[in-house]
Image: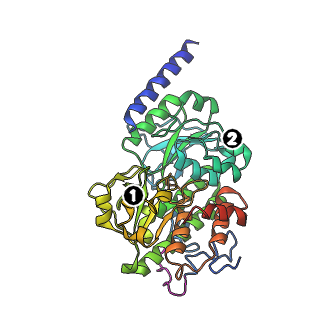
Amino acid sequence: MVKKITAVILLLALLLALAACGSGTRDTPVPDTSAAAETPAQTAPADTPSPSPDAATPGNADTPADQGEDPNDKGTPGTLRYPEDEESTPGNIVTPASEDTRAFVDSVGRSVQIPKVINKIAVTGPVAQIVLFALAPDRMVGLATEWDDSAKEFFVPEYYALPVLGQLYGGKSELNLEELLNADPDVVIDVGEPKDGIVEDMNKLSDQTGIPFLHIDGYTATMGETYRILGELLDLPQRAQELTDYCDGIYAYAKNLGESLGDKKISALYLLGDSGLNVIAQGSFHAEMLNLLVDNAAVLDNPSGKGTGNETDMEQLLLWDPEVILFAPDSVYEKVGDDPLWQDLTAIKTGRYYRVPFGPYNWMGFPPSVQRYLGILWLAKLLYPDEAQYDLYTEVAHYFRLFYSCDLTQAQYEQLISQER
């Protein structure tokens, strides 16, 4: 009994410390699981050059998994090794060799002992939650944050109702270590951009709970590799390859389209907040997808890494004066057409302002997870219809099947898209 009380006290102390530190007709086929399927990256529009041989397209993706891994390389993120091959590194957790464990090198270089078989996983935040839900929903023992209400329409009830364990960085609900221990996951996975101090945080949590905590990088440009690593980690290579091919194909298509447009890219701003005066600036993690397809007019010395972007003012918006303005789903889109304050902006005067679709999450990426590929498809079709020669409903429906295991109806699609102007 004394040991249990001591453990709880240690866990509460750790949680407080982390809280203080956290600041129709188909013109272009979608990525499919069949061998003969083509992706937008493979079937580029007639006026869009095909991707270069180096493009990360399905079928020729030049990944470590395709090349074969060097058994002597102990520092490649995502590699799996047995404990007897592991070298002890100060600050990292190394347990004795066991027939039931293996070593895993995560994306921040930590070598962590993990079970050979992983049946139960927990996640540290909403990015990881959405990424892992697509790959292994049946292995998730809890959520970092509640699903949006709109997800109920698309998700299997048992997954929608998973218990909320809280999230490690930010959010309304902090990670509850007692609930985490009760859920008894084999591993806890963090996905996304690594936060400052993440190595120390992962090590402390692994040590205190006895549960391996792992970080896997997750960016729009490299999400295919993220899924490859997760597929190896969870022993789901075939399912992970489907997701890898999709992510690589859509990203290559968007990159190719953006490069082919050159200086013909449309200038745009993406605005957020109750007053619409927060902006996602060039150079931020949250601008990854936006910068592929538009000339992001928001150039700032210190782009914010937060999902709320940088605060600005109307004077600055007038100086940027983009051709197009995109408003976040919960921003001021419905008001700006009649608000005199906004009437001097070219995008408002010409009616080229739009609200980003939402369901079950913001398609432009808040949180900045895999739904950004929906944003790519939507934005390309919206701004460059002559180049984006595909049926958007078909593409969105394919995404919903692949990532949410949901057969999206035409009526559901129309409701999602109706949020755009």
Point out which mark residue 407 bears. Answer: none
Image quarter (top left, top right, bottom left or bottom right) of the N terminus: top right
Indicate whether residue 117 is drawn in magenta: no
Q: Where residue 351 sits: x, y (%)?
A: 46, 71
In front of the other: label 2 or label 1? 1
Residue designated by label 1: 280
Image quarter (top left, top right, bottom left or bottom right) of the C terminus: bottom right
18 or 265, nearer to the observer: 265
- The Cα atoms of the two marked residues, 2 and 1, are separated by 32 Å
Q: Where residue 162 sits: x, y (%)?
A: 67, 40
Res 56 seen here:
no
Q: Where residue 300 sits: x, y (%)?
A: 29, 59
Image: 407 above or below 77: below
Main SS type for the magenta part? loop
319 or 179, nearer to the observer: 319
Residue at screen point 58% across, 51% down: 130
| Residue 196 location, quadrant | top left
Amino acid type indicated by mark 2:
Ala
What range is drawn magenta here?
A: 45-55
From the viewer's perspective, is 43 left or right of 406? left
Q: Earlier in the sequence, mark 2 or mark 1?
A: 2
Residue designated by label 2: 161
Q: Where residue 87 sits: x, y (%)?
A: 44, 43
Amino acid type indicated by mark 1:
Ile
409 or 135, nearer to the observer: 409
Res 378 seen here:
yes
